[in-house]
Image (spheres, rainbow, N blue to C red):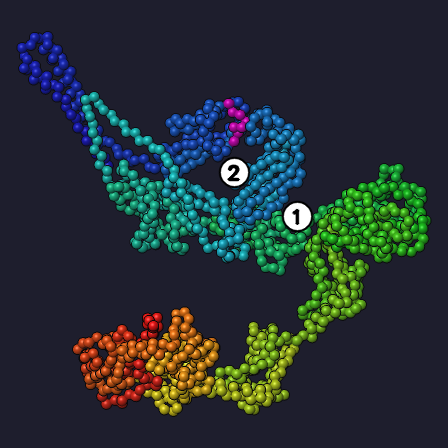
Amino acid sequence: MYILIFCMLRAPEGMQEYQRMAAHFGRDLVQLQHELHRMKVATKEQVDNIEITREVKGMMPLRKDYPAEVPKAPDFLVSLRSHTVWEKTPVKLFCTVSGKPNPIVKWYRNNVAIEPLSAPGKYKIENKYGVHSLIISRCAVTDSGIYSAVATNPHGKATSKATVCVRSECVFFSPHIFSLSLLVIRCKLEVTLLESFGVTFGTEGESVSLVANMVVVPDLPNLPPEAMWYRDDTLLMPSRWAEMSIGGGVAKLTLPHLNKDDEGLYTLCIWTKDGTAEHSAYLFVKDATPTVAGAPGAPMDVAVFDVNADYVLVSWKPPNTTHEAPITGYFVDRSCKLLYVDVMLKVLFCINKHLIYSCLVYVTIPDPPTNVHATEINKTYIVLNWTPPSPRGRAPVWYLIEKCVGDSHIWQRVNTAVQLRSPRFPVYDMEDKKSYRFRVITVNKYGSSEPSEPTAAIQKVDPYGVPSAPGQVIASRNTKTSAFVQWEPPKHANNLMGYYVDASLVGSKKWFPCNHRPYKHTRFVVHGLVPGDTYVFRVQAVNASGLSEESQDSAPFFIDAALSTPSAPYGISLLNCNGSSMTLAWKRPKNTGGSKITSYYLDKREAESVDWKEVNPSPAAHRTFMVENLTTGVFYEFKIQAANLAGVGLPSEPSKAFACEAWTMAEPGPAYDISFWEVRDTFVLVQWKPPVYAGAGPITGYFVDMAKKGSSDFVAVNAEPVGHCYLKVSHKTPHFVAKLKNANIEDKDMNVISVWTRDWSTKEIVCGVDEETGDIFLNFEACEVSETSKFTWSKSYKEITESSRVSITSSGRNSKLTFVNAEKEDLGIYSVAVTNTDGVSSSYSVNEEELKKMLELSYNIKHPIVPLKTELNYEILEKGHVRFWVQAMKLSSSVNYRFIVNDKAITSGYKISHDASTGIIQMTIEHFTKANEGTYTIQIHDGKAKSQSSLVLVGDAFKGALKEAEFQRKEHIRKQGPHFSEYLSFHVTDDCTVMLVCKLANVKKETTFTWFKDDEEIPVDVPPNPMSGSCSLPIPMFSRKDQGIYKAVLGDDHGKDTSVYDISGKVFEDIINAIASIAGSSASDLVLQCTPEGIRLQCYMKYYTEEMKTSWFHRDSKISSSEKMRIGGTSEMAWMQICEPTDKEKGHYTIEIHDGKKSHSRTFDLSGQGKWKLDFGNSVQMCYMNYLLSVDRGRVVGGLPDVVTIMEKKSLSLTCTVWGDPSPEVTWFKNEQEVVSDDRYKITFEGGKFASLTINNVYVEDSGKYSINVRNKYGGEFVEITVSVYKQGGDIPEPKLGQMAKPAVTPNSTNLESFNFK
């Protein structure tokens, strides 16, 4: 609602004049009169203005508020009209368009925008008062075409089209002619189409070209004929998707990227002198291979309609589905393009000279829409329409749509993502079988209106639904590779779009699509079929809702050419003449018309006559015929007509004139009916029939000559005559001429000529044995057959009619010759020919070697055996059960078998089963005892096949099996309780500690574990934890004293298990070798130490024991321990002492440590060369001085025990006497960690001699390995003490196996170069 307030502003000129006159009253009278006149005029103007103001105020209540203009998509009130004009005359196209805002109109010709500036003066575009016009001045023929006006505004687009035809003096018109002279010339061209494109098959995404060859007269290189391409009567224009070219006698259309929309009937139309020359062929486009197996093909013919600013409706045609799953839905993608519309807003102001009016606009909230209703309802969406509100305010409005289910009052917003401005909108996402109510709310920037009145309940329905199934489908002949299929339309078309045709090979049950785009008519030619196969067809109707049910299948249809009358026979020849009759022969027509030729009709005439007479009312059934009642000495001509089911064909050319004179010559007449069979790339079989006239004597043979086609240079094929009427000829060219002559004819003239111009390839005869019956057969599959074809079998090229040796069966393309009882008598060449085809034939030679192989295979099939993969065998199972089994290569589900033990069939007591998928038959004996010794046999019967296998289980073999069965039985019982999954074994750690390990199974918390050596329990610090699954026993510093029998005992209330390990003999050697391997790898270089007795070579390693295989060598000679050279060692090193060394002891010294696999060696050079340049005369002095140095090193003189055992909460004092000059440094360690003096640990070192470590109130946690390190600049040593703390009242622990105190002297190798001996 709008309220306008007008305010009048009075001009102050009158008051000012009045004051001025009062102030100057004394002026003269003339001036006063002028002033009074001016005042009267001004006063009158003011009075008039006041009156106008009153009138305006009085009219204000009568003012109406007109609603703002409703946005509207473009609409043509007056559409374009088609025109036909003469050349050089103007034409004007006009239309009237409405829409808010005003639409912008653009003009197009043949979908190409018209730009007036591109042809100045040619086009004139006008727009007056909503009438849009296009004026074309001086029209030319080239201006003919389809003109369209496209109106666009922000709310949609509309198009109007019209055709302009410009006539000229030439009768024939082409829209692509550039001038009148070119048009006249092109209309006078003579064009003859030669080889043209045929039915073409393509796949989506591929490229295909349609090519037509032609002859153009006159052939003008710069002026090719005008060619137009059509697809289903739609003219194609050159584009990136359709490339066209013509020239050089070739017209070509290339589709670089096929889509299923490209499928259809393509027609090439060429303008000629006599009109047009046309050629049409169908292009099939099948679906590309889907990215996901079983996915349907792409939809096609995507179109949009109901275009406006808020939405568009998109439609498409569904794809054909044959073996894919039914279509459940579609996905729609979109690509947006911005449309720019220039809108000019003009504001007009009315200003009076003395008055200024100002308007104040008050915008109220708009009213709700009215008349909300559904204008379109289908199964996918509902289109709502409503009347815009009034008043609606001058601010732009938009609409919100809400819906609720049934009578509920739960309203849900529909267009949440769309700001809807049009009074029309499609609603989707509604469930089937539910009704909905709708209401609409108007919104502007000031707020929203109340909801409109809701609609009545609306439920989506399918107004059309899918069409009903098409009616009866009938197939008929078309060509050798196509069929003509027609059907009755569905009773309920329901806005039908077209049809899909499917085909299936009879017996295959697999359907394939014949077209991939809906076909609009009720007849269709199905191409790409295999000649000689039988198909059935079905049809589906399609509309926007989907596919109909399939029609009923057509009757099985055999693919063959359409029936027609045969072509004319040819090659009429004379075979014999006795003076009153002539015997004629001729060749079969090249085209039989798709049916068997049933008869021939002969006519004759005398050579000098023009009238033809019938030879015989009864037609000839064969291609030879004796014409009787002729006059001797007269020349006769003959012509022949062939007949089939379609009728009588054309007559042949008249034969040459034959003289009716009796043949009396000695040489035979000509052979006849020469034919070619078994045509292959390198050979061909030539056959003929013997002469009718034999001459004076019997025929001795035949010669065959051959020449290339077009050449008269014949070459003899066979040097010696052949006595039969066939010959296999090798060749190198597929085109040749054959000449046949009798061997007893002296002249060289050819008797019969036949030309072969075919390049034929066919399948060959296959020899095999029937897998079921064992019969030997020859099978042939023809590559081409007709409905009347028959298979003719021959032996040695003589037709087999009736024979007790073979039987012949034929079906479809296959024919089989089966030998009843093959023997040597059946050896030979077998051939087969297919009648009413283009020479389909093959042959096969059955020789003695091949027959022997086939007989063996036949015997094996007739007397089959069950092939065994493995013979009868046995195995011991874990419970002590014994399984006897055999495996066959293949078993059927109906196999029968039985086990026989010691000549008695097993019927019960044992578990017997089989698995046909694996071929295994088995029998299990659960309690295997001595009574089961003997011979086991299995007999198998599978259909006709038999087999048998035996196993002898006696003597040592049986004893071994019985022992293993008893062991497995005991093992099974043992494993019912706690048991060892892995028995005791050993391994050596990196510090050379030997670990006895075992793994446990089926244990629980109550399970106990105990270690024994020589039946005495071994105490351990930490009790074993059976729940961990494994237990181990460490044996440090392993040596010979650790030999013995170790035992691990595991038990609970479920049972008991024991593992025994004897460490002696080879096991002891293996342990020592394992230690030697680790120790040898860790061995240090040899170190020289001087002692009071002489020189000592020392080798430090992780662990050394005298049981290790250690050898010392001097100059490659092994050293044995003696008074001169002593060999020994400690737990940390091996040494060799040289007492009172002399020059004899010079040389290389080597220590070798053997681990059973390899040796580890270390070498020291004591030869006096190199680094150790030493005078052994002074060696005693040097060693003595070095000894003095070693005496002054830091060391423990005494006082420390090896092992200390103490009760908990007592005080422990470890005290020792140390020595060293200078006084050594003392460091205490616990478990290799340095001990620091504190409240509990007190460390003292008194007088440089007495070192002590005192621990107050010891606990069990204080147990461990303690050591003292005494060191000065000359060296030092480590001394270890093992401390064991036990609780009060507990047992005093004993020393562990192999544990002892280890004094470890820190090596300080003597550097002889540091002494200067003089």
Of 237 and 552, the residue lying toward us: 237
Q: Earlier in the sequence, mark 1 or mark 2?
A: 2
In the rendered structure, the answer to whether residue 187 lies left or right of residue 1127 reads right
Q: Which mark is residue 478?
A: 1
* The magenta segment: 138-145
Residue type marked 2: Ser
Q: Nearer the viewer, mark 1 or mark 2?
A: 2
Which residue is denoted by mark 2 in the rendering? 239
- Residue type (three-letter) at the residue carrying disc 1: Asn
Residue 736 vertical position relative to residue 1117 in the rendered view, above or below: above
Please state, as top left, top right, bottom left or bottom right, where the C terminus lies in the image: bottom left
Residue 1090 lies within the magenta run:
no
Name the residue located 39 percent from the left edge and 43 percent from the top edge.
Answer: 311
In terms of secondary structure, where does tag 1 sit?
strand
Q: Residues within 10 Å of mark 2 (few under 14, many from 20)?
A: few
- Which secondary structure lies at badge 2? loop
Q: CA distance from mark 1 to mark 2?
A: 35 Å
Indicate the position of residue 1306 as horizontal and vertical percent values. Answer: 31, 76
- Residue 337 - label: none
